[in-house]
Image (tube, grey):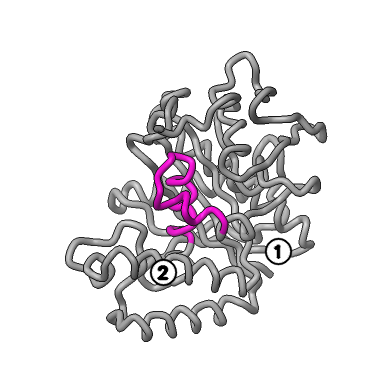
Amino acid sequence: MQLIFIDDSGQQSPPREHLGELASVGAVMFPEDQVAAYSRQIDELRTELGMPAGEEFKWNSSKGSFMAGAGVEVVKRTRRRMLEIAASCGVSTAVVIWDRGQIGWPKERVAREILGYLYERIEMHLESREERGVVIADIPGGGNRDHTKWLAGAMDLTTVGTTYVNPNRVVMPIVTAPSDHLPQLQLADLVTAATTAAVAGREAGMELVELLKPLARRNTHGYIGGAGLVLWPRSLTDLFYWIFGETHYVRNSVRYPIGPGFGFSQPGSLFSTSSGLPK
């Protein structure tokens, strides 16, 4: 059995050229026997920091919180340590990022679409491990009405599936829980936000890439692109070269070269010759 924790994130105004507003959702997938081990090590980290009980680790710490006043270097070390603990517990991750600057669907429609893409990666992950899983999401903002609507939409995934996967491995409807009660949901916040920040071109995310890479799911060819990270639309595909150093992208079992001199989606590739980062 695997326990999967999911959370959403986003970036309003990415510094990376060509990108518009980014919407994202991500999952951290735990072997059942490592859930308690992760919680225990995070409790030890909290004690080392002197962090008050009940206060959660958040990518964007609330004003007046312990981490908001801890200083930049403490925040950086803490993020790195959380990812290192996750790796020691055998955690696998998947993140889906949608550029609304390229395809400007309404936010609610984008949220449904990327959740479906993420669900497919969860089912594929479980299938590859020959395991079953339970999915726990952070409670969405917006109050009870939005919460109920979100759950109803998510139930379609676990009863009908998607065009590409059947609901074979996730054994029950997606449930929600408050993130302040679950350090695993706080890890989902970190992984999703950090990955989105890296794609956006923000230093806070890019400096964590080398710790995010070992966690990310890979396809049978060994690539993160399309497996541990989905970028949509396809005009963003060359970013797998600039962010993760990958030289190919696999689609329908065919390896396509990406990066300078190639451009997976020519015409229309936005990053075939440049990372898009400010110089």
Q: Amino acid at mark 1?
A: Arg
- Does 191 appear in magenta? yes
Tag 2: amino acid = Arg
Main secondary structure of the magenta stretch: helix
Which residue bears the numbered disc 1?
A: 132
Q: Residue at x 46, y 43 (%)?
A: 24
Label 1 Cα crowd, 10 Å radius (few <14 / some 14-19 / many 20+) = some
Is residue 105 something that shows in the picture?
no
**Residue 215 vertical position relative to residue 107 in the rendered view, above or below:** below
- On the rendered structure, is 79 left or right of 62? right
Extent of the magenta region: 188-210
Sequence-first tag of 2 and 1: 2
Quarter of the image containing the C terminus?
A: top left
Please give the label number shown on residue 80. none
Q: Position of residue 46 (x, y in %)?
A: 37, 80
- Answer whether residue 190 is visible to the viewer in this image: yes
According to the picture, the residue beneath numbered tag 2 turns out to be: 77
Q: Residue at x 68, y 41 (%)?
A: 246
Q: Is residue 223 left or right of residue 10?
A: right
Residue 231 on image: x %, y %: 56, 36
Residue, far left: 64
| Badge 1 element | loop
Spatial CA span between label 2 and label 1: 34 Å
Q: Toward the viewer: 204 or 133? A: 204
Examine the image and state in which quarter residue 101 appears. Answer: top left
x and y, in percent, of residue 219 in the image:
75, 47
Q: Is residue 195 magenta?
A: yes
| Quadrant position of the N terminus in the picture | bottom right
Question: Where on the picture, by quarter, is residue 253?
Answer: top right
